[in-house]
Image (cartoon, rainbow, N blue to C red):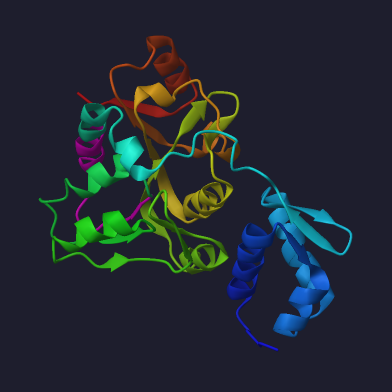
């Protein structure tokens, strides 16, 4: 029997076992971590609310979401609309103030923000993306905070309950959120459930949420919902945005910046 006191580690184990085997039993997890079955059922209930699994009698089964939406790799995403992403990255960096504490979400557009921080001397930066952390390390002057969790190969990002629990220890000035899909009625979304879940945590600990994405992401939907558009303060995109969309967003109180 393995005794692990940390709730995030137990919950991370649940997700990993579901990913490997597709099913998990309450009794097995209860025995492994020496906690009550009621505690494990609460874990499963929490995950079910986040659409990470489906509870069944005696345990839970994995939701088969791997074919829902295009969950492309970082390399594939970098090849799409690269010029627009560069412009958005520069525009986003202009919103940062010296001494800010910021979060850079994983993604190819947020990576461009990391490349445009030369003028700053004192920033504290949280990121769950290993490739972004490497770029930030090259400045050799910013504290870079990386959560735990497990690594998603496609996005080079750390996700899962351990990462989410770690992030809840902070409160930040600005979150730069990279998203895959934007829809006025359904809000922002992503193909991956675990990415959606950690993005929700990032939003909850941020004073200002700035969504950065190219105009091809408008009027689309992905499988996993991140948040309604009311959670977004500012959108930075390119000149391909439909003027009617821009007007509607501004009517809803969302600032729209067109990166030129």
Residue at x 59%, y 74% (from the top left corner): 9
Tell me, yes or no, if residue 148 can be seen here. Answer: yes
Identify whether 28 is placed above or below 164: below
Position of 40 relative to 199 (above/below): below
Classify 117 as above or below 136: above
Q: Residue furthest right?
A: 57
The picture places residue 148, in percent across and down from the top left corner, at 45, 69
User: Residue 185 location in percent, x, y?
Assistant: 60, 24
91 in the magenta segment: yes
Q: Which residues are magenta?
A: 88-105
Q: Residue furthest left?
A: 119
At horizontal 80% and vertical 67% (from top left) the residue drawn is 25
From the image, which quarter does the N terminus lie in?
bottom right
Coordinates of residue 159 in the picture (x, y in percent) = 49, 59
Magenta highlight on residue 129: no
**Does residue 5 appear to the left or right of 116 in the view shown?**
right
């Amino acid at each position: 029997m393995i005794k692990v006191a940390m709730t995030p580690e137990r919950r991370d184990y649940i997700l990993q076992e579901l990913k490997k085997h597709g099913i998990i039993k309450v009794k097995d997890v209860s025995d492994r971590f020496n906690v009550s079955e009621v505690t494990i059922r609460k874990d499963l209930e929490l995950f079910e609310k986040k659409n990470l699994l489906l509870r069944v009698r005696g345990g839970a089964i994995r939701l088969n979401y791997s074919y829902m939406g295009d969950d492309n790799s970082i390399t594939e995403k970098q090849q799409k609309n690269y010029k627009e992403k560069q412009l958005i990255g520069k525009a986003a960096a202009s919103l940062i103030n010296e001494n800010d504490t910021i979060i850079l979400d994983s993604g190819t557009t947020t990576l461009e923000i990391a490349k445009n921080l030369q003028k700053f001397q004192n920033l504290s930066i949280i990121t769950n993306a290993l490739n972004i952390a490497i770029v930030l390390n090259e400045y050799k002057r910013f504290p870079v905070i990386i959560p735990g969790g497990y690594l998603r190969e496609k996005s080079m990002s750390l996700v899962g309950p351990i990462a989410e629990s770690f992030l809840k220890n902070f409160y930040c000035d600005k979150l730069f959120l990279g998203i895959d899909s934007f829809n006025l009625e359904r809000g922002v979304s992503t193909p991956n459930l675990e990415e959606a879940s950690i993005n929700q945590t990032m939003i909850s600990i941020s004073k200002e949420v700035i969504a950065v994405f190219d105009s091809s992401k408008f009027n689309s939907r992905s499988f996993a919902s991140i948040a309604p558009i009311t959670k977004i303060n500012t959108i930075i995109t390119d000149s391909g945005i439909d003027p009617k969309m821009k007007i509607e967003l501004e009517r809803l109180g969302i600032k729209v910046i067109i990166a030129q």
